[in-house]
Image (cartoon, helix red, strand yellow):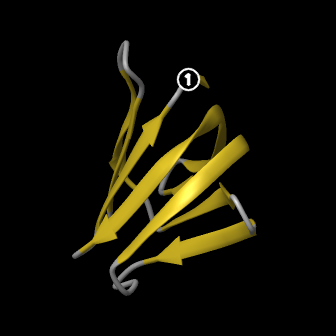
Amino acid sequence: MHLEIITPDRKVFEGEVTSAQFPGADGLFEVLNNHAPLIAALKAGNVTLTSAAGREAIRIEGGVVEVLRNNVIVLAEGAVA
């Protein structure tokens, strides 16, 4: 699935991943390929990505995630890659 992490200043990450774990407002949750459509609030924490290159964690400062047809977009208030 295609994942983008965007802040007001820049695009932090864009690429293909097999899974992504998010710090949801109500707790951690994971998104896999062919996930049902979803919009969720995020709190500060790590977005953990798994891709062909391995695992990577990107710290975000909160925001919103949208999942639709294997496209995942994170609109983060801030991020440190």
Q: Is residue 9 above or below residue 5?
A: above
> What residue is drawn where x is 48% and y is 77%?
32
Residue depicted at x 37% and y 87%: 36
Q: Position of residue 45 (x, y in %)?
A: 75, 42
Q: What residue is pinned by disc 1?
A: 78
- Residue 53 drawn at (x, y percent): 52, 48
- Write the residue at 37% across / 12% down: 9
- Depth check: give the residue in front, 58 or 36: 36
In depth, the one of 56 and 46 nearer the eye is 46
- Taking the image as drawn, is residue 48 in sight? no
**Residue 40 percent location from the top left of the image:** 50, 64
Vertical comparison of 57 with 51: above or below:
above
Residue 75 locus on image (x, y percent): 41, 40
Disc 1 crowd rating (10 Å Cα; few below 14, some 14-19, many 20+) is: some
Quarter of the rendering occupied by the C terminus? top right
Q: Residue at x 69, y 46 (%)?
A: 43
Quadrant of residue 4 in the image? top left
- Residue 50: quadrant of the picture: bottom right
- As shown in the figure, which amino acid type bears the numbered disc 1? Gly
Quadrant position of the N terminus in the picture: bottom left
Q: Is 32 displayed left or right of 37 in the figure?
A: right
